[in-house]
């Protein structure tokens, strides 16, 4: 059995109280791990290359500013590519902000809740290429202002060479990481409090 | 040629959060039922999902759909102690309200109302937002969910203390974390791959029956 990635990145020891707590939701636990494998070591790479998957992951987790998780995906990317890690790290620096934000339809009852924020465009398109640049821009939209998603955003991906199935995989990748990083942060905090209570 | 974006220029769009049953239309072509292989059917888990354009679109990557569904079902339906279903749904609704997913919020607000019998409290969350007044226990669940939805994350020990003070044990707190975290996954798919449609006018729906 492969390492439980949530336990590893949350610092949860086998046999600890949080580890046992996770066993109370065994299918959630097992399928969170299967989801990670489906996205980062799929049975067939399909339309999204391994380096692309890990570049998007390094970018997305960098935006979430969880040092442990971001380092993990950045290291995986470094195993796959020589030039992408530094380029992605520079994009993360420029792209960090706080969310969620975004506009609701003008004139509607939610318009007063619209919050303006950064619409990110990548800096180093030469190194990243059109296809990965479009993916990172889309990832930024999904991370910070998902409510501003639009058919036009998908059209930009298709114009950059993404297929329908590739976009589904890319969307799952970004959305899954949004889940994984939060479960890790939440369980790590619960674990820390438990350890504090025992000492 | 499937790689085109589907526009819906004449769509009747819901403008506010609601507990009504909304529709959802995809912006990319779902698989058709005829295109589904055994592998796809397995990934859908529940055969009724083959009627849903959302799941037929996600079926284009069956491996992750299958694993995602397994995660979803255990987080929300595992009835072995922990957080009552109504509050797992509340966490999902609050997360969706904060991220701005009108469709997800409609479904899970409706479930939260159904299981809690507290429709007015749920409606206040939708109408006035995540800061609208709620009792102490719901306040703690909503606040933790919203903090977890922030990027970067804003969940603190104080949020977990508030949940514990409100009567949640560690398993229930873990359920809040999982239910809220999961909707950061779900919201981003529902929001980015299509959009909700307003419910049909009530008169029309009567004629349908």
Image (cartoon, coloured by chain):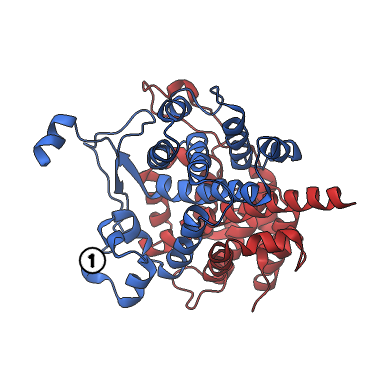
Chain bearing tag 1 is B
Residue A90, above or below A5: above
Left or right of A3, for residue A102:
left
In the figure, what tint was chain A given? red
Residue placed at 69% from the left, 63% from the top? A20
Left or right of A119, for residue B114:
left
Residue B129, above or below A153: above
Residue placed at 75% from the left, 57% from the top? A68
Count how many numbered circles sit on residues in the image. Answer: 1
Residue placed at 41% from the left, 50% from the top? A156
Residue B41 sits in quarter: bottom left
* Residue B98: % across, % down: 52, 34
From the image, tell me which residue sits under label 1. Answer: B33
Location of the N terminus of chain B by quadrant is bottom left
Left or right of A20, for residue A119:
left
Rendered blue, the chain in question is B
Left or right of A14, for residue B28:
left
* Residue A106: % across, % down: 39, 24
């Amino acid at each position: 059995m492969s390492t439980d990635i949530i336990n590893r990145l949350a610092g949860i020891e086998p046999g600890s109280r949080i580890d046992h707590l996770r066993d109370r939701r065994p299918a959630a636990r097992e399928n969170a791990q299967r989801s990670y494998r489906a996205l980062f070591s799929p049975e067939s790479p399909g339309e999204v290359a391994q380096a692309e998957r890990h570049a998007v992951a390094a970018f997305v987790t960098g935006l979430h500013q969880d040092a442990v998780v971001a380092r993990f995906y950045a290291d995986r990317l470094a195993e796959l590519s020589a030039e992408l890690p530094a380029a992605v790290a520079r994009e993360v620096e420029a792209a960090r902000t706080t969310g969620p934000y975004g506009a609701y339809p003008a004139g509607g009852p939610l318009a007063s809740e619209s919050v303006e924020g950064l619409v990110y465009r990548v800096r180093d398109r030469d190194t990243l290429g059109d296809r990965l640049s479009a993916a990172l821009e889309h990832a930024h939209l999904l991370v910070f202002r998902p409510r501003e998603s639009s058919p036009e955003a998908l059209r930009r991906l298709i114009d950059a060479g993404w297929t329908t199935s590739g976009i589904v995989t890319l969307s799952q990748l970004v959305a899954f990481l949004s889940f994984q990083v939060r479960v890790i942060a939440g369980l790590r905090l619960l674990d820390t409090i438990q350890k504090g209570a025992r000492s | 040629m499937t790689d085109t974006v589907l526009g819906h220029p004449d769509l009747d769009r819901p403008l506010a959060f609601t507990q009504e049953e909304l529709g959802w239309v995809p912006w990319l072509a779902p698989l058709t039922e005829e295109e589904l292989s055994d592998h796809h059917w397995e990934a859908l888990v529940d055969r009724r999902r083959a009627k849903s354009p959302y799941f037929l679109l996600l079926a284009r990557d069956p491996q992750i759909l299958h694993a995602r569904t397994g995660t979803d079902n255990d987080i929300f339906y595992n009835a072995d102690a922990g957080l009552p279903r109504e509050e797992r749904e509340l966490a999902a609704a609050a997360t969706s309200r904060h991220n701005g997913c009108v469709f997800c919020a409609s479904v899970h607000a409706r479930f939260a109302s159904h299981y809690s019998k507290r429709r007015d409290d749920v409606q206040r969350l939708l109408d006035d937002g995540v800061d609208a007044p709620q009792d102490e226990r719901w306040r703690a669940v909503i606040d933790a969910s919203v903090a977890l939805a922030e990027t970067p994350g804003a969940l603190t020990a104080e949020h977990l203390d508030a949940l514990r003070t409100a009567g949640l044990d560690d398993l229930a707190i873990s359920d809040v974390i999982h239910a809220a975290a999961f909707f950061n996954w779900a919201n981003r798919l529902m929001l980015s791959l299509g959009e909700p449609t307003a419910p049909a006018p009530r008169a029309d729906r009567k004629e349908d029956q």
